[in-house]
Amino acid sequence: MSGPGVDGSFIFVNTENSAQCNNFVITFTKSSMRTSIIKIGNSKGLRLSKQIMQQYQITDQVDLILEADRIILKPVNEPRKGWDQAFRKMAENKDDQLLMGDVLEDEGFDEWN
């Protein structure tokens, strides 16, 4: 079974049904598109559509990865974004208590002296 993906890529689904297993393997082929380089002031740039920006969660910045034969634009990953607000909320709810002390009971600082 196969068909076009949402982003224009092609999806292949391989199903193996037997009495012992029920495996579904989904393979996404990489999609590509051609776009024009546009003039932006004294520089040049790429214009990304709103759909691409939303699909890849691109806001204001991208990581630019330069390889031998390609340039890769990658959304900036901010894994700790919003943690400060979550920690403040935890403190307000008194849900920020330590689960274990700084030093375990069977450990000491004597060996460090």
Image (cartoon, rainbow, N blue to C red):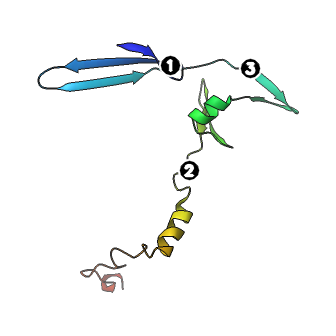
Q: CA distance from mark 3 to mark 1?
A: 20 Å
Q: Label 3 neighbourhood size at 10 Å, few (<14), some (14-19), many (20+)?
A: few
Q: Extreme right residue here?
A: 42
Q: Do callouts 3 and 1 mark residues in contact (Cβ within 8 Å)? A: no
Q: x and y percent of residue 30 in the render? A: 50, 22
Describe residue 62's horizontal placement relative to residue 109 as left or right: right
**Residue placed at 57% from the left, 33% from the top?**
55
- For label 1, the residue is 9
Residue 36's label in the rendered image is 3
Q: Label 1 neighbourhood size at 10 Å, few (<14), some (14-19), many (20+)?
A: some
Secondary structure beneath dot 1 equals loop
Residue 109's label in the rendered image is none
Q: Do callouts 1 and 2 mark residues in contact (Cβ within 8 Å)? A: no
Q: CA distance from mark 1 to mark 2?
A: 26 Å
Q: Nearer the viewer, mark 3 or mark 1?
A: 1
**Residue placed at 29% from the left, 78% from the top?**
104
Q: x and y percent of residue 2 in the render? A: 39, 13
Q: Earlier in the sequence, mark 1 or mark 2?
A: 1
Displayed quadrant of residue 33 = top right
Q: Nearer the viewer, residue 41 or 4?
A: 4
Describe residue 38's horizontal placement relative to residue 63 as left or right: right
Q: Amino acid at mark 3?
A: Ser
- For label 2, the residue is 78
Describe residue 47's horizontal placement relative to residue 1 as left or right: right
